């Protein structure tokens, strides 16, 4: 009888949730849309950060001397340069305003004689680091031509060598956004969970339930299990979107890491934390309206602090420390351990312990504060 | 045998100054339809919640067919239709019946059989697959009653069962209750509608300020409303 009651409690909860279109939008479509649009939006920024964007450059050779022609040719054919022809009738300001190019290089008459230097114009809103890199590149090409050096890099190779390791901290847009917004949406489960509970209290169905021989713990399980399962389904869905849909839409693929099965314990613990948050909101709020405000505000703040909206690696040091107060930070870092750092389960364990403690505290406080009737 | 036997119940809510119920006693004989009347704040809803096991922490005893509450078989012998329409409005009629039937421990076959009967009794057979949120107030009220009847209780507790319903639904509910009582079901009817109590019930209990102030046969009372006002006073109750 107990199992049958539990089954019916779970079934009832899922049926109610599935018939609420707003909740479906909130739990499933919102994160998909966020992953889609924010990954597309971040693609350019990430391209700059990770692979180096090609510099779109207009070159004007007013000299046409052999040296000037060689310089123009070397600039145009450099692998980091994308040569753009000056659009007809556009001055420099218009070119930058319309985003046609990042920089304009002019080789003036008298360049060969050393009378006039090469002139550079940059889009005024270009990133300072990007501007400096472009300027250094044009300088080194100019030095090669003027000094008659075939390739400056081979000369410098004896003096300077780069030994940078591949990044284990900087996620691709998909590695950042898929777990980030899956976690974000999982925490939003607190809204339907708490609103449903308070609505049942308000309309008397919860009180009516207790006029039957139903154990209170069974009612609690009947409330938690469906949302826990929905949380896991949410994550699986977001993962599938990331792997099979988003990787076709943007130029970054989604690597699951060397130990993708680690997602199982991590997702189970994250789902416990999110349902714990939902139970806590349900216990603290007095009305359904209050609970949805509390849950949404809590989830958004946890997202802002926890490196969901702004990647943790890009945060200033103080914010990186502050992020640790958010359970979303620990959840997100646990997933990044899997996708980015190929971490062993032992390395992920401390994050899982923090999330388990968070869940435990939520359930404990909720248990002390909840008023069933 | 008494269907319901309440002796010397005293109860107060946390933080409240006075008692919601003070040394309250009540008996309902098996097979009777009895009215429970009282102005706002009389303690009727508190009493209903104690009888149905929702409230604990009271002193005194509640026996349902000689089973002392809280008790599983006592709970199963009660059918309770609360005053708020306590149904899952996103679910269909049948889904609501299935859910509450499972909570009462009915098997799938019993739920199917009993659903058919209570839907006929409440005139909702044609609306079994419709979601409750599309129902009128009267239909919701009737389903509220159907749920209470589903597990064939021996004692039916009704809290304002006809509030906000049209005359047709009200009359249908009255006929259903009369029929059930005639078949032997004991009914405790908590209501503010004096005509309803006078028409349906053979005995009456009047409560005020947490105490039982009258209990006796309806036949002893000529004019129930006048009698009620004489017993409870004419001042307004804003509780």
Image (cartoon, helix red, strand yellow):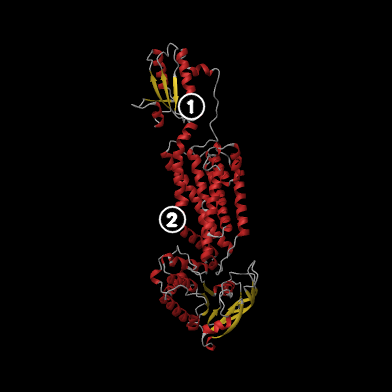
Asked if residue B29 shows in the view, the reply is no
Precedes in sequence: disc 2 or disc 1: 2
Q: Quadrant of the N terminus of chain A?
A: bottom right
Tell me the residue at 61%/46% (across/down): A354
Q: Residue lying farthest top?
A: A113
Which residue is more in the foreground, B187 or B227? B227
| Spot occupied by residue A65 in the image (x, y as percentages of width and height) | 38, 13
Asked if residue A285 lies left or right of residue A138, the reply is: right
The numbered dot on residue A139 is none
| Spot occupied by residue B7 in the image (x, y as percentages of width and height) | 63, 79
Image quarter of residue A243:
top left
Name the residue that disc number 2 marks: A21
Asked if residue A110 shows in the view, the reply is yes
Mark 2–mark 1 distance (CA, rounded to whole Å): 49 Å
Label 2 resides on the chain identified as: A
Asked if residue A242 lies left or right of residue B13, the reply is: left
Q: Secondary structure at mark 2?
A: helix
Asked if residue A33 lies left or right of residue A162, the reply is: left
| Spot occupied by residue B177 in the image (x, y as percentages of width and height) | 47, 79
B6 above or below B98? below
Q: Nearer the viewer, mark 2 or mark 1?
A: 1
Q: Quadrant of the C terminus of chain A?
A: bottom right
Q: Residue lying farthest front?
A: B235
| Spot occupied by residue A196 in the image (x, y as percentages of width and height) | 51, 59
Tell me the residue at 59%/51% (across/down): A359
A219 above or below A117? below
B236 above or below A38? below
Q: Secondary structure at mark 1?
A: helix
Name the residue that disc number 1 marks: A131
């Amino acid at each position: 009888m107990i199992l049958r009651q539990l089954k019916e409690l779970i079934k009832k909860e899922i049926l109610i949730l599935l018939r609420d279109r707003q909740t479906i939008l909130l739990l499933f479509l919102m994160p998909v849309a966020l992953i889609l649009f924010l990954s597309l939006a971040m693609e350019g920024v990430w391209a700059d950060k990770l692979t180096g964007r090609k510099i779109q450059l207009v070159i004007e050779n007013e000299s046409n001397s052999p040296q000037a022609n060689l310089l123009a040719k070397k600039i145009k054919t450099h692998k980091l340069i994308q040569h753009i022809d000056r659009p007809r009738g556009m001055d420099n300001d218009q070119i930058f305003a319309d985003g046609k190019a990042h920089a304009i290089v002019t080789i003036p008459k008298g360049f060969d004689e050393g009378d006039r230097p090469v002139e550079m114009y940059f889009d005024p809103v270009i990133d300072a680091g990007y501007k400096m890199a472009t300027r250094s590149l044009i300088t080194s090409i100019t030095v090669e031509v003027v000094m008659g050096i075939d390739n400056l890099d081979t000369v410098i190779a004896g003096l300077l060598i780069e030994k940078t390791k591949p990044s284990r901290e900087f996620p691709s847009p998909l590695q950042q956004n898929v777990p980030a917004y899956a976690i974000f949406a999982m925490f939003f489960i607190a809204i339907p969970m708490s609103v449903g509970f308070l609505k049942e209290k308000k309309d008397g169905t919860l009180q009516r339930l207790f006029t039957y021989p139903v154990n209170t713990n069974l009612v609690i399980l009947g409330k938690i299990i469906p949302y826990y399962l929905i949380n896991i389904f949410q994550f699986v869905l977001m993962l599938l979107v990331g792997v099979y849909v988003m990787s076709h839409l943007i130029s970054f693929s989604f690597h699951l890491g060397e130990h993708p099965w680690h997602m199982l314990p991590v997702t189970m613990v994250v789902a416990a934390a999110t349902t714990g948050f939902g139970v806590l909101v349900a216990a603290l709020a007095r009305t359904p309206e209050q609970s949805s405000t509390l849950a949404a505000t809590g989830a958004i703040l946890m997202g802002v602090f926890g490196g969901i909206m702004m990647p943790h690696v890009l945060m200033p040091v103080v914010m990186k420390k502050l992020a640790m107060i958010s359970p979303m930070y620990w959840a997100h870092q646990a997933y990044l351990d899997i996708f980015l750092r190929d971490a062993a389960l032992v390395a992920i364990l401390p994050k899982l312990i923090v999330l388990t403690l968070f869940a435990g505290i939520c359930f404990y406080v909720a248990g002390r504060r909840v008023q069933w009737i | 045998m008494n269907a319901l036997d309440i002796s010397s119940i005293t109860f107060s809510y946390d933080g409240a100054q006075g008692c919601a119920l003070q040394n309250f006693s009540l008996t309902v004989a098996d097979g009777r339809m009895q009215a429970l009347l009282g102005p706002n704040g009389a303690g009727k809803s508190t009493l209903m919640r104690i009888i149905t096991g929702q409230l604990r922490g009271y002193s005194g005893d509640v026996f349902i067919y000689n089973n002392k509450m809280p008790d599983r078989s006592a709970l199963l012998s009660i059918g309770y239709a609360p005053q708020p329409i306590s149904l899952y409005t996103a679910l269909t009629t049948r889904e609501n019946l299935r859910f509450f039937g499972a909570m009462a421990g009915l098997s799938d076959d019993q739920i199917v059989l009993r659903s058919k009967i209570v839907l006929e009794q409440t005139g909702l057979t044609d609306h079994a697959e419709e979601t409750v949120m599309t129902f009128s107030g009267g239909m919701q009220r009737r389903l509220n009653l159907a749920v209470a009847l589903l597990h064939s209780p021996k004692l039916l507790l009704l809290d304002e069962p006809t509030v906000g319903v049209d005359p047709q639904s009200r009359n249908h509910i009255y006929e259903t209750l009369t029929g059930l009582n005639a078949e032997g079901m004991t009914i405790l009817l908590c209501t503010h509608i004096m005509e309803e109590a006078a028409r349906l019930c053979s005995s009456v209990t009047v409560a005020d300020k947490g105490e039982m102030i009258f209990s006796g046969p309806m036949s002893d009372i000529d004019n129930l409303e006048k009698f009620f006002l004489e017993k409870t006073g004419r001042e307004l109750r804003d509780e």
